Image: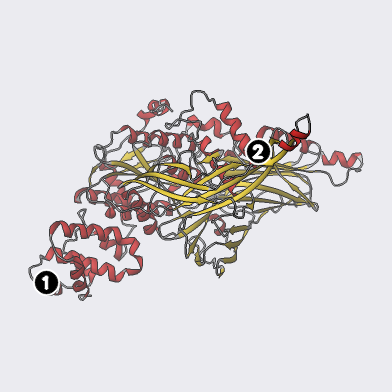
Amino acid sequence: MNHKYQNNETVPIETVFVFPLDSKSAVNHFEVFLDGKKIKGVVKEKKQAKEEYENAIKEGKTAVKMEQEMGDVFKMNVGNLKPDKCCIITLKYVTNLESSEDSKLTFYLPQALAPRFVPMESQEEFNKTEFSKVKYSKRVPYGTTYTFQFDMNSKIEAISSTSHGEFTPTIEGTKANGTYKASRQDDFGKDFKIDIALEKPHEPRVLLERYTYPAIETGDPETVTTAMLSFYPDLEEQDVKTEIIFLIDRSGSMSGKRIDNVSKVLNVFLPSLPETCFFNIVGFGSTYEFLFPNGSVQYNNQNLKTAKEHALGIQADLGGTQIAQPLQEIFNQPTKRGYSRQIFLLTDGSVGNTRDVIDTVKREAQTTRVFTFGIGSGASTALVEGVAKAGNGACEMIADNDPIRKIVLRQLNRALKPSITNLEVQFIDGLSQPNLLAPFRIPPVFAGKRVLIFLFFDESPQKIQNEENEKENEKEKEKEKVKKLSNGSVALKGAGPNGDVEFILPINFTNEIQEGTMIASLASKCMITEIENSNSQYHEKTGSIKSNINQDFLNKEIVKLSTRFQVISKLTAFIAVVENENENENENEKEELKEKPQLRIVEVQASNLTKSSMGSHGVRKSWKCDGEGGGGGGKVLRRMLKIKQSNEKKKIKMSKKSPQILKDRDKYSKKPLSRVRKQSERRSESRKLNPFDELIDLQLASGKWELSQKLMSLLKVTKEKITQNCPENLEIEIWTVLLVIAFIQMTYKDTKDEWELLVNKAKKWIKKNSQVDIVKLLEKAKICF
């Protein structure tokens, strides 16, 4: 990723640019190009990096510093950039590609930032960040160019982008390349999402790399072999009794297309729920509202109708984004006996207290799973991914033009199907014991999702006695010898729906081991994130720090991992200082160089800015964009990304009840259903359903369709034709449901994943109410169309 900064002014300037990256990204390379010089940045403890940066500015030097402000927000400072000078900064990062059940891999590149609502108790900490001072604009004075290079281990079948449909790379076997230039101003405000379809994406693999680095204490070279293991467990289908709660962000930042997408999401979810479930819908902002105030209700026709009406009229009308309070209110309610509780959180993640929200979810992970949707460009990956991981669920990002129905049902399938839990790793068949393992606690595995495990094997030289020299000489001599690693296997064991399961991958160190930093970067990022999210070997399962550990120790461990493997963290920063080109300048020129640079804050592409009241507690109250590019000389941002894959593996280069929450609970309300209905009526007229959605809307909670004039109109058949073709001795209500299934299978055959759950529910109703041959009767029903 290249950032290009140009100073067109007549005075030295210091630029500050805040930008997003996926929270899983491990930034592991940083270079500065200026005046023909190339300076490689070094990761140092944040305080030390700040001192070096400030000292360099005082001495008239150009310095560049990069920090991680929040989990998915980074800051670049270019200090003392001289007039007419151009500085190019290259940063590289590696991240995991997300896998899905439809055999695709997804690369996600955030582009826009959304203002974050910060509760009163978190404002002091948030105000210390540069992110709190960001200037937002709908039109920024810079552009972006993307150059993608794909190198996969399996044949590429297709590459597409739902966010930037014009992106059409050239594909040749396992390789592809393409360029995209955001010429329209609104392009840069959309997150870039690329789906990569491979011929064989789900094969288990092992990738080995050797990484050599200078020891922190001595500077001597140390070597580790790193392994990345990828498992793809198969899961059998099995019905799960569940209570499902939809937690909907209705804050001001969700207005417009985002809240419309939420309405669409709910209208996909609701008809697809199993008949045996309990459910509820909770909207939140500065306040929160339960659709059913007395708790989750049985999934039946009347409750389903109420929920559908609410979904059609839902609005972004509840002020600021306070997620922790409604979450805690849900957790305070007892789980229903015999039912697993699962929350679906739909939000743009525009909060500044991400850590508090994740901690709230983590404390209740034993009783409740949480699945998340990041809605729209600029959605916080740190929040939605962090909450899903803490809640043992899964995360999906929904861009404006994404196929919402497919994404929603993919998540629902995960929630309704069993997972593999209580996962643990064992090293068998004589395999050398690794020094480090990440993640320390492996989250549950869902169908179509992979498990990534990172291992560190110490290969540093060991001093051993040389027996020959010991016999010849009185004085012992030593020589260095590299530790040899023993081949073996890794076993992944866990509890499946039908008992214990085991998956085995062999590791062979005699095969070629590539030199590289990718796996070490990913592994160290994983370990740093685990410490930050209270999920490491230094924490109890509840998230509390172990009794013999303190926060100072944890901070030192983060800094140690970050500096050892040169991966940026919240406690470290990249720093690069450009020495003056001419050391023999006269005193006047030196004084000019020491002139304090003028501060220029680069405007940030805003995501979904609207002028709306955001509540009294947050930093974000009212946003207004003037649409003007600003200040400083013409800043230009350019990005180049390389997406590569080796021959082995895919790669891309509070106590239980928070005192604060308990203190503030009287400020929040579960508003009556009558008010919710009135609000819903105001928007339902503007959200008309398409024919397919209308057909789904007629399905009852049991899975049945009743014969009606509207149904016949949608199926384009008459009542006479239905009765004439109904088989003898078959009840008309059974035949009606079979006709609808046949119509859906024929008309929407290319989108099976969007209606499969609905059809399966209908088939279950038929089996429950008759003993007919469904397959045979469906063939007869298709003749009617």
Tell which residue pokes out farthest to the left in this image. Answer: 729
Q: Nearer the viewer, residue 710 or 755?
A: 755
- The coloring applied to the image is secondary structure
Residue at which label 1 appears: 727
Indicate whether 187 appears above or below 598.
Answer: below
Residue 14 lies left or right of residue 704; in this view the side is right
Residue 36 lies left or right of residue 445; in this view the side is right
- Which residue is rendered at x = 62% and y = 34% of the image? 559
Q: Is residue 783 visible?
A: yes
Residue at which label 2 appears: 563
The number of numbered badges drawn on the structure is 2
Give the amino acid at mark 1: Pro
Measured as percent of width and height from the top left, residue 167 is found at 54, 65
Callout 1 secondary element: loop
Measured as percent of width and height from the top left, residue 744 is found at 27, 67
Residue 587: which quarter of the image? top right
For the C terminus, the image quarter is: bottom left
- The mark nearer the N terminus, 2 or 1, is 2
Give the amino acid at mark 2: Thr
Tell which residue pokes out farthest to the top in this image. Answer: 547
- Which residue is rendered at x = 81% and y = 37% of the image? 59
